[in-house]
Amino acid sequence: MEHFKDVENVWPSDMPSPPSPPPLPSPKLSPPPEPEGEPIPWQTLQALEDERLAIVSSVIRELMYGHIYAHLPNVNVDWDLEGSAVCRVEGARCHGDDFEEPYKLQEHLGTSYHLAHNATHIPRERTPPPGERYTQIRQEVQAQITRSHNVSITEATNNEIAPLSAFPECSGFQEADDKHDDDSDSVKSIILP
């Protein structure tokens, strides 16, 4: 057997070149999409966002501080004024004054001046503020969550119910004995953590 080191490499001088691979299909390029209309400059977008921020801010101020003005239903309240303790009663001599703390503003709005100012305005028709609908929806959602998380077994007697300790996955729960209004049946409830 020959050793590899002793073998001389001899290549033929007229070796044919390897066949060329078939040409790859070129993908058909679609034309670039044409812009729809003129692009909006960033200044216009910034102005739209600033306007949106102002509207959202005024709604948030109304939700947060509306209860302070609830006893003045006949006056117009300027929710566009920034600040947490600013007198927002339009047409009042103190409109725009900052009282530094919400409790000071609440005391100020209870003065005889503001009560008289409210009395001089004609009562206007009111639609329910958005906060009432929000509260109603929130209460409905909380009731649904409570119903879905409370488990009570009303048709079974205590003898038919396995103790909660029989279920290791319920180790963090407590058992509570409840009574119906008519005190006829004992009900076993599970209180979720």
Image (spheres, helix red, strand yellow):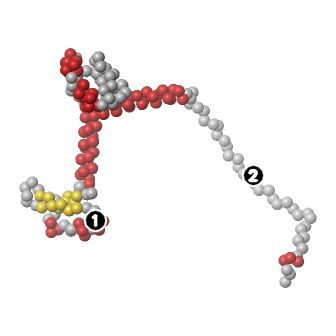
Nearest to the observer: residue 86 or residue 179: 86
Q: What percent of the width, then of the height, locates residue 45?
A: 50, 29
Nearest to the observer: residue 25 or residue 182: 182
Q: Amino acid at mark 2?
A: Pro
Residue in the image at 29% along x and 68% along y: 168
| Disc 1 element | loop
Q: What percent of the width, then of the height, locates residue 139?
A: 24, 43
Task: Classify mark 2: residues with Cα within 10 Å, few (<14), some (14-19) or many (20+).
Answer: few
Q: Establish if 86 lies above or below 188.
A: above
Q: What percent of the width, then of the height, locates residue 104?
A: 26, 29
Q: What percent of the width, then of the height, locates residue 180?
A: 11, 56
Q: Residue furthest right?
A: 13
Q: Amino acid at mark 1?
A: Ser
Q: Establish if 151 lies above or below 50.
A: below
Residue in the image at 33% along x and 22% along y: 96
Label 1 vs label 2: CA separation? 69 Å
Residue in the image at 45% along x and 28% along y: 50
Asked if disc 1 and disc 2 are in contact, CB closer than 8 Å, the reply is: no
Nearest to the observer: residue 159 or residue 28: 159
Q: Which of pointers 1 and 2 lies earlier in the amino acid sequence? A: 2
Q: Which residue is mark 2?
A: 23
| Disc 2 element | loop
Image quadrant occupied by the N terminus: bottom right
Task: Classify mark 1: residues with Cα within 10 Å, few (<14), some (14-19) or many (20+).
Answer: few
The image quadrant of residue 61 is top left
Residue 171's disc number:
1
The image quadrant of residue 121 is top left
Relative placement, left or right, of 7 versus 125 is right
Residue in the image at 42% along x and 30% along y: 53
